Image: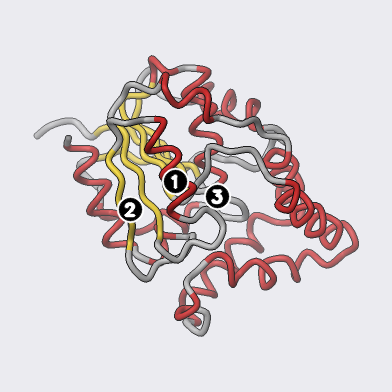
Amino acid sequence: MAEAIPLILLPGLLCDQALWDNQIKSLKGLADCTVADTTRQDNVAAIARDVLATAPRQFTLAGLSMGGYVALEIMRQAPDRVLKLCLLDTSARADTDEQQKRRRLLLSMSQAGQFKGVTPRLLPMLISPARLDDKDLTDIIMTMAERVGRDAFHNQQTAILNRIDSRPYLKDIKCPVQLIVGDQDGLTPPEIMREIKDGIPQAKFNVLKDCGHLSALEKPDEVSSLMRGWLRS
């Protein structure tokens, strides 16, 4: 039996291992999964360095949303160490002024003692409208946010606010790439991810029907199937 491939999974904002639970189970035997900690630093480059410091010499890499920003930074810092790359519901752009304003508002709420109000405010942008009444799904998201906590949220938002525009660097990515996005993603819609596809012409690009931003949770079986094909390619 072939040895399992090292796979580092990078969660999004206010997410932890629960984001990837289905993929970890589904890919068992094919991938040796590790979920990286993206909470301890307040800039993307430092988060990437932390991940690389404990990573195997070579590995495969998957990141969703903020995890995608970190993944693109890892590709800049150590492209020779990444065997394959999977980006889910993310963007190669820096924040727009409107996005920065929204992030600063959420930071202000949290700093004013209203951290528990942040995730309910974000929820309509994280999953498809049809799933907003799905208590099993929303409970997972809310519980993840509670575990990640306020201080880590401040670090993550600060890192995201100050990230660079990665689009000029996409052309340098030469490893096999899988791109996945929900068709109802309100934060990084398909047209944003098509920019990544345009920058990495060899990448495979899949849009998931009736799916929002947290595709690994909302369409776990479809995401796991695509990742299985990507790992085997």
Residue type at the position of mark 2: Gln
| Label 2 environment density (alpha carbons within 10 Å; few <14, some 14–19, many ≥20) | many
What residue is rendered at 56% in x and 57% in y? 187
What residue is rendered at 37% in x and 38% in y? 197
Residue type at the position of mark 1: Met
Q: How far apart are marks 1 and 2 (CA)?
A: 21 Å
What residue is rendered at 35% in x and 20% in y? 58
Residue type at the position of mark 3: Gly
What residue is rendered at 70% in x and 38% in y? 159
Residue 215: percent from left, percent from top: 41, 59
- Picture layout, residue 85 above or below residue 227: above
Q: Do the residues labelled 3 and 1 touch (CB within 8 Å)?
A: no
User: Element type at marker 1?
Assistant: helix
| Label 3 environment density (alpha carbons within 10 Å; few <14, some 14–19, many ≥20) | many
User: Element type at marker 2?
Assistant: helix
Q: Distance between the residues labelled 3 and 1?
A: 16 Å
Q: How far apart are marks 2 and 3 (CA)?
A: 15 Å
Mark seen at residue 193: 1
Where, quadrant-wise, is the N terminus in this rendering?
Answer: top left
First along the sequence among labels 1 and 2: 2
User: Which residue in the structure is indicated by mark 3?
Assistant: 12
> In the displayed structure, does residue 99 sit left or right of residue 8?
right
